[in-house]
């Protein structure tokens, strides 16, 4: 899958992008441990989290408690697949990441069924070593059949990356 990174002038592309990717790697690791506290620690205190079914959570505590429940129930024993499509920076303290993801048991799925957007922030006044945290997360379930039908009848809808 094609990945791109763009940053504002004066930032280290590799350093900032690597730091952002590390946050998402830690998110996957916390999921695999079913550690709701470690998962939640990667979010800002006032983060928003929107699930693919449309549930809206606000705040780290809400995210932690919902994931504690999920890890003990619906998502017990699952792993998290994550694929970064794009990382973009809007100044030294804001990054937007688009990717695909899915939960699974057993073998990692070949096609990931959700498209995701993460907005990460860091306190720029704290210097270049300030930690990145997720301020907002949006998870949308993909509908490949609907995409294929719409592309067939309206080819102009096919994203440039897929042409």
Image (spheres, rainbow, N blue to C red):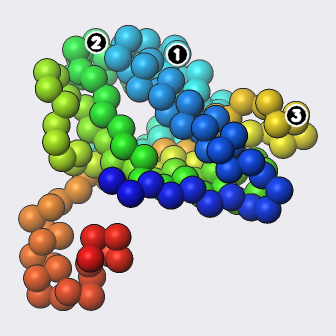
Give the mark toward the camera: 1 or 3.
Answer: 3
- Classify residue 132 by image quadrant: top right
Would residue 108 be seen by someone viewing this image from the given angle? Answer: yes
Q: CA distance from mark 1 to mark 2?
A: 15 Å
**Residue pointed to by mark 1:** 38
Looking at the image, is mark 3 or mark 2 earlier in the sequence? 2
- Disc marking residue 72: 2
Looking at the image, is mark 1 or mark 2 earlier in the sequence? 1
- Disc marking residue 67: none
**Residue pointed to by mark 3:** 126
Would residue 47 be seen by someone viewing this image from the given angle? Answer: no
In the image: residue 76, left or right of residue 60: left
Q: Residue at x 25, y 32 (%)?
A: 103
Q: CA distance from mark 1 to mark 3?
A: 22 Å
Q: CA distance from mark 3 to mark 2?
A: 37 Å
Residue closest to the eye, 134 or 46: 134
Looking at the image, is mark 1 or mark 3 earlier in the sequence? 1
Q: Quadrant of the C terminus?
A: bottom left
Residue 66 in the image, given as x and y percentages of width and height: 40, 25
Q: Residue at x 74, y 39 (%)?
A: 122
Residue 129 in the image, given as x and y percentages of width and height: 80, 30
In the image: residue 126, left or right of residue 23: right
120 in relation to 22, above or below: below
Q: Residue at x 48, y 28 (%)?
A: 25
How many numbered markers are drawn? 3
Q: Secondary structure at mark 1?
A: helix
81 in relation to 8, above or below: above
């Amino acid at each position: 899958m094609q990945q791109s990174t763009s940053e504002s002038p004066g930032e280290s592309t590799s350093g900032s992008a690597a730091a952002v990717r590390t946050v998402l790697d830690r998110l996957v690791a916390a999921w695999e441990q079913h550690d709701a506290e470690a998962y939640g620690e990667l979010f800002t205190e006032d983060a928003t989290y929107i699930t693919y079914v449309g549930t809206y959570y606000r705040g780290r505590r809400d995210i932690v408690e919902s994931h504690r429940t999920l890890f003990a129930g619906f998502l017990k024993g699952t792993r998290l697949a994550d694929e970064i499509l794009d990382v973009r920076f809007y100044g030294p303290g804001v990054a937007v990441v688009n990717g695909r993801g899915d939960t699974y048991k057993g073998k990692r799925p070949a096609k990931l069924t959700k498209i995701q957007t993460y907005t990460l922030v860091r306190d720029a006044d704290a210097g270049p070593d300030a930690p990145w945290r997720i301020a907002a997360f949006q998870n949308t379930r993909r509908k490949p059949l609907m995409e294929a039908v719409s592309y067939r009848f309206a080819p102009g809808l096919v994203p440039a990356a897929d042409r």
